[in-house]
Image: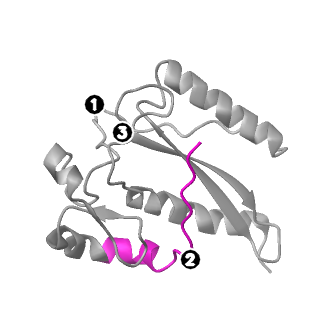
Amino acid sequence: MYTVSDRRNAIRPYVLSIQIDLKHNRPWRCEFCTKFARESVWMTSEWLQLKTPSMVSYVHLVCNSEIGECAQTLSAINSEMQSLAGAPPRPLPKLSRNGTKYPMAASCVNCNNEAKESRKHLKQCNRCKITRYCSTDCQRADWARHKVFCKTVKEVKWVWA
């Protein structure tokens, strides 16, 4: 019999590994300002104690999750979600920046090409309908990594607030 802790330890690495797959063919903007979104921040609600464990992920596309007004708003949403779930406060994960400029949400998952002409022609994976590529070559080059995520997608529901 698996404990909730066992299930959480098993699912977290998977969630971290699939975050790169959420690419879009539109130049998404930060949900709190008008800058281009470069970070996808995941907040999850888990029901791992159930006979059929489940998890819902809320993905927030933001310009910066650590500095500025957008980061403060995101932190407030995180605190509210935790309190509504009756969970103890859990801080948002800190990104390892080291001067990194993250690719826009509207870029190829393999080569991170974010040129405007490339964004217009991004194609989604035919199987999962989520991950975006600029070419068949990029999709083939990424298949070894992407197939784990691709084979687990059962349903995708995009919700805009």
Q: Which residues are magenta?
A: 144-161
> Amino acid type of disc 2?
Lys
Q: Which of pointers 3 and 2 lies earlier in the amino acid sequence? A: 3
Q: Which residue is mark 2?
A: 154
**Quarter-of-image position of residue 110:** bottom left
Q: Which mark is drawn over residue 38? A: 3
At x 75%, y 40%, the residue is: 82
Marks 3 and 1: which is nearer the front? 3
| Left or right for 48, reference 108 | right
Secondary structure under the numbered disc 3 in the rendered image: loop
Number of labels in the image equals 3
In this rendered view, identify the residue nearer to me: 52 or 13: 52
Q: Position of residue 155 (x, y in %)?
A: 56, 72
- Marks 3 and 2, how far apart at CA: 26 Å
Which residue lies at the image location 43% right of the left edge and 30% below the top edge?
Answer: 64
The answer to whether residue 125 is above or below residue 58 is below
Name the N-terminal-most of marks 2 and 1: 1
The residue singled out by tag 1 in the image is 99
Q: Residues within 10 Å of mark 1 (few under 14, many from 20)?
A: few
Q: Is residue 131 left or right of residue 17?
A: left
Q: Secondary structure at mark 2?
A: loop
- The earlier-in-sequence mark between 3 and 1 is 3
Colour theme: one colour
Q: Between marks 2 and 1, how big is the CA–CA gap?
A: 36 Å
**Which one is closest to the eye, mark 2 or mark 1?**
2
Label 3 crowding class (10 Å Cα cut-off): few <14, some 14-19, many 20+? many
Q: Is residue 117 above or below residue 143?
A: above
Three-letter amino acid code at the position of disc 3: Arg
Q: Position of residue 118 (x, y in %)?
A: 17, 52
Please tell me which residue is depicted at 46% across the width and 80% down the height of the picture. 151
